[in-house]
Image (cartoon, rainbow, N blue to C red):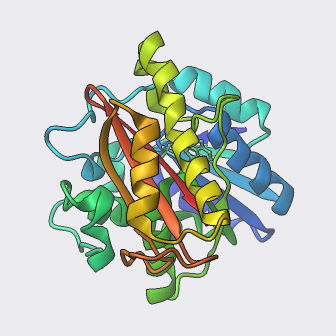
């Protein structure tokens, strides 16, 4: 595996590759969820690029940018074990320049994850567009766990005619259903136990829907009953165009949930 730190070096290496490239962008602190994306990429492509970049532009002032987990050494080992070909770990200064052209995310970026962080998805799209330009992968892998991000990246790819196929990957979970996340390590033992209720509430929603109950307020109430005293930031129902809906539409609904444990926000969702 070759570690690349500079954009110039990356561009030069990229020019020499003519086989099928798979790309997995990450913010590091790699876990089984990331590994599942890398494994899928490995199966479907000849050469694999993984990037690790904690993107400052997608964190707002009061968020955890400086304390976001950094595990470069173990990340490198994991990528080696996964037989990644190129690991791109750029400096912030090599990605961003002063007074640069800015991407503006569409309306669907100001709800849910963007509601209290209006610049979050502008920052995500800005860096992902740069990474797409640098790596020019045939296939790029993103988790359904970050459903709104996945939707906006797919939309950017469509709107800007970017030549990469977005591959949506299933959410990897712990045995008790908790979606794997870099932030889970910050939970206390008690919180970790309670966090399993998040996925339980989503599976309960699926069960209710399977009995032909499509009213989102009834389903939401049942979910809240399961979540008991947890600090639920939101439970929302959207269609695949990320418009909020009042009635579940089969094969066209995503139920999204965020639960907060102190300052830690745990995201999860389920596709109906
Ligand atoms: P991050 O490092 O958090 O930016 O995540 C990098 C990629 O991994 C994103 O496309 C995420 O959606 C995806 N991802 C994160 N957690 C999981 C998980 N538990 N299962 C599958 N994909 C995940």
Question: Which image quarter holds the N terminus?
Answer: top right
Q: How many marks?
A: 0
Q: 173 or 68, which is in the foreground?
A: 173
> Residue 77 appears in which quarter of the rendering?
top right
Q: Is residue 143 visible?
A: no
**Eyeballing the image, is 169 above or below 189?**
below
From the viewer's perspective, tell me whether residue 51 is left or right of residue 16: left
Q: Position of residue 152 (x, y in %)?
A: 43, 72
Q: Is residue 18 visible?
A: yes
From the viewer's perspective, tell me whether residue 143 is left or right of residue 100: right
Of all residues, the one furthest to the top in this rendering is 189
The residue shown at (74%, 32%) is 80
> Residue 170 appears in which quarter of the rendering?
bottom right
Q: 224 or 123, which is in the foreground?
A: 224
The residue shown at (63%, 35%) is 177
Q: 192 or 145, which is in the foreground?
A: 192
Question: Which image quarter holds the C terminus?
Answer: bottom right
Q: Position of residue 9 (x, y in %)?
A: 54, 53
The residue shown at (25%, 46%) is 59
């Amino acid at each position: 595996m070759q570690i690349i730190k500079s954009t110039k070096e990356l561009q030069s290496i990229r020019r020499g590759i003519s086989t099928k490239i798979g790309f997995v962008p990450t913010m590091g602190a790699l876990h089984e969820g990331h590994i599942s994306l890398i494994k899928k990429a490995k199966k479907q492509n000849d050469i694999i690029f993984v990037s690790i970049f904690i993107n400052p532009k997608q964190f707002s002032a009061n968020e955890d940018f400086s304390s976001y987990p950094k595990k470069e050494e173990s990340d490198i080992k994991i990528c080696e074990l996964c037989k990644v070909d190129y690991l791109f770990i750029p400096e912030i200064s090599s990605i961003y320049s002063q007074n640069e052209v800015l991407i503006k995310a569409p309306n669907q970026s100001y709800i849910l994850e963007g509601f209290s962080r209006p610049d979050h998805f502008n920052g995500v799209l800005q860096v992902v567009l740069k990474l797409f330009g640098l790596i020019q992968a045939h296939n790029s892998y993103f988790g359904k766990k970050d459903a709104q991000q996945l939707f906006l990246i797919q939309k950017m790819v469509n709107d800007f005619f970017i030549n990469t196929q977005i591959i949506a990957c299933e959410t990897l979970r712990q045995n008790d259903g908790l979606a794997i996340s870099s932030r889970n390590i910050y939970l206390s033992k008690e919180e970790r136990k309670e966090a399993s209720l998040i996925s339980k509430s989503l599976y309960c929603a699926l069960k209710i829907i399977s009995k032909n109950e499509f009213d989102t307020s009834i389903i939401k109430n049942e979910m809240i009953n399961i979540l008991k005293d947890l600090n639920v930031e939101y439970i929302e129902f959207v269609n695949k165009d990320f418009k909020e809906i009042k009635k579940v539409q089969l094969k066209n609904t995503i139920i999204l949930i965020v639960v907060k444990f102190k300052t830690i926000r745990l995201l999860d969702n389920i596709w109906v």
